[in-house]
Each structure stands twice: as C-alpha cells, then as structure tokens.
Image (tube, rainbow, N blue to C red):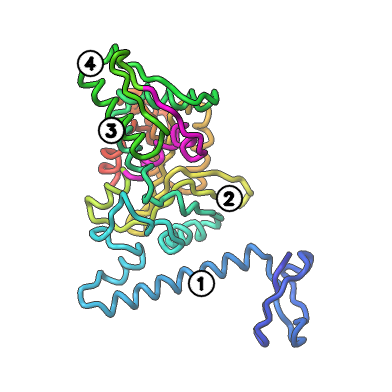
Amino acid sequence: MAIVRCNKCALLAEQPETFANQSIACPGCGAQAAVYPTLFFIEKLLDKYFTAQREVIRLNSANKPAAQPAAESVTAPAALADLDLTNTDTLATELQHGPIHDWFHKKQIKIQANLRGVDTTGFFDEVAMSIGGDPTLLKDVVERIRWAQQKEHSSTTIPLAKKSPAEAQAISAFCQQLYDFSFVAKCFHNRPENNVRLILQSAPSIRHFFNGEWLEWFALMTALNYARERNKRFSCARNLSITLQNDDSYELDVFMLIDGRTPVCIECKTGEFRQNIDKYLTVRKRLGLDGKQFIMCIVGLSDEHAKGLSAMYDLSFVSERELAAHLTRLF
C-alpha cells in the first residue's frame, strides 16, 4: 500500500501501490495531495522524530548550569559517568540508535535495529566477559555445552582430571556462575569423579549465546568499556540489519559511532570464517569504511596469523585478546 498525505485538510490514508509517487485529488477535501511509497514516508517520519528528540535533549541540556555542551548531548542520550554499562536498558532505545540511523540514512542504506541487542540488564554481558577473559581455559566448557545443545542432549559433563588445581577451580567457578545466572538448570560438582555435570537450559537465547553470540556480547562490552575509559560519546548497536540500495541485506554483529562521527564495525567469529571474507570486503566497501574500522574478531587467532591476514585483505583481523588494543590504536 501507499500513503496519501493532504497538506490542506491533514488527511492521512492508504492508497493502492500503483498511485505511489503521483498526485491525486484528496479523498477528504478534493485538493491535490501527494502519494508516497510507504517505506519512504516512514523513513521521513523517523528522520523528523529523531531530529525532534535530539533537539529536546539539546534544549534540556542548555537549561542546566552544569550540562554538557549541546553538540555532545545530541550524539548520545546518557552521560557515561552516570551509566552502569553492565546493567542498563538505556542503550536499548530508538533515541540511542538515532545517530546510527542518521549515519546510514545519509548513505541511503536502510537499517533495522535490534533494540534488545544492547540491553545489558540480563547476564549475557557478564558471562561473555568471563569467557572472553580466558577463552583458552573455558573453551572446552562452551564447546561441550554447544555440542550437547545441538544434539538435543539434556546435560553435559566437564572433566577436570587433567587440569591443574588452579584451572579446575576456575572452571568450577565458571560453571557455578552459569548456574547462578540461570544459563544452566543445575550444576553438580562431583568431587569423587573430579568433574562437573551441567543440566542444560533449552531457551533459544541461551542456545544462541553458546553457539557464538557470546563473542558479540564480549565485543560490544569491550567497545563500550573503551569509550567509557576515554570519556567518549557513542551510539551502539548489535545485530544491526542493513539493506543496501540493490536490496542486498546483511547483519552487522556490532556497530558503534564514536563521538557521533567515527564508525566502527566488528564482525565476530567463533568458528570458520575464511569463506566469508569476500562478503565482508563487499560490506566494508559499501559502508565506505577504512580497513582499520572494519574489524574481524576471531576467537583464538594468533597474533602472527592476524597480522598476515590484515596485510592480505583490507580488513583488520584481531583475536578477542587484542580487540581492546586495536581500538586504542584506531583512535
């Protein structure tokens, strides 16, 4: 369907798609009125909405004696010093995503933001940071859970016999964290057999997390912590769906605008990634990003391998260990 909007009587009504981009007699008052394609009309409406919201923020900031400068307030809705990044739904709003929408709109790229993708009131971010803090040690736990979920098993066992006492203690603590945060239904520490048995959860969000989504959360939180440590304003998105002018569609794992103008895209891979390099090169070119701004975060990638791949392709390959350091070099 298309939409007719009359400037004389303010009528707003649907019309057949064949009338799009034409001028017809208004069904209400008879005056000539333009008929717009629905998507075009909604995009223009959102543009005005975000512009109005940011103007409200600017005006409110101007009325506060100790407010931040207006230009900074427009770029991000919340002050970093007052924001608990690990427990907030402030980022999960249309307003927070507004600058990202504007940035893509200028490039004539349609986007659909997953607002819940940056809602940190749950425990996905905390567990992801635990995994990313020592992926070599905890890889076996994550892989055993992922494999058991794919095979529709109800439980999995984590052996500790070949681990050092310190490693066994760290793995047991991580398994207990999974239970405390309800990532598993039950956790049994079997000391006579020196293992931990986990009864699994079947919720789709938990399955997606162990199937690789944990790295997206880790990348997001690493980028947010970088911005906070340097007191930079930002807008962020996770699982951002984009549609290019030729109708090609892609999903960006993590996208961030630093200080409202510098874009960073992070693609996260916990498994095979080589077959997708051409795709990411295409996306980088379509977005107009420098190779340093399009980051391929690959779990377990050695520094030497990452350096070699970065030299071969106009992309930045890093491991989860080096992601924070790369962001520091980038800015």
Residue where numbered disc 3 is placed: 133
Q: Is label 2 or label 1 in front?
A: 1
Bin the neighbour count of mark 3 within 10 Å (Cα to Cα): few under 14, some 14-19, many 20 and up.
some
Are the residues at dot 1 and dot 4 in contact (C-beta closer than 8 Å)?
A: no
What residue range appears in magenta? 197-221
Residue where numbered disc 1 is placed: 48
Q: Which residue is drawn at 54% across and 54% down?
A: 112
Q: Which of 138 and 148 is in front in this view?
A: 148
Report x, y in % for residue 109: 55, 54
**Element type at mark 4:** loop
The quarter holding residue 310 reads top left
If you read the primary sequence from the N terminus, does the residue marked by circle 2 or circle 1 appear first?
A: 1
If you read the primary sequence from the N terminus, does the residue marked by circle 4 or circle 2 appear first?
A: 4
Q: Which of 298 and 123 is in front in this view?
A: 123
If you read the primary sequence from the N terminus, does the residue marked by circle 1 or circle 4 appear first?
A: 1
Are the residues at dot 4 and dot 2 in contact (C-beta closer than 8 Å)?
A: no
Are the residues at dot 2 and dot 1 in contact (C-beta closer than 8 Å)?
A: no
Q: Can residue 156 be seen in this view?
A: yes
**Residue 244: mark:** 2
- Vertical position of residue 226 compared to residue 64: above or below: above
Report x, y in % for residue 246: 63, 49
Identified by mark 3, the residue type is: Gly
- Vertical position of residue 235 compared to residue 147: above or below: below
Q: Give the Cα separation between the discs numbered 1 and 3.
A: 42 Å
The quarter holding residue 174 reads top left
Residue where numbered disc 4 is placed: 164
Q: Residue at x 64, y 62 (%)?
A: 39
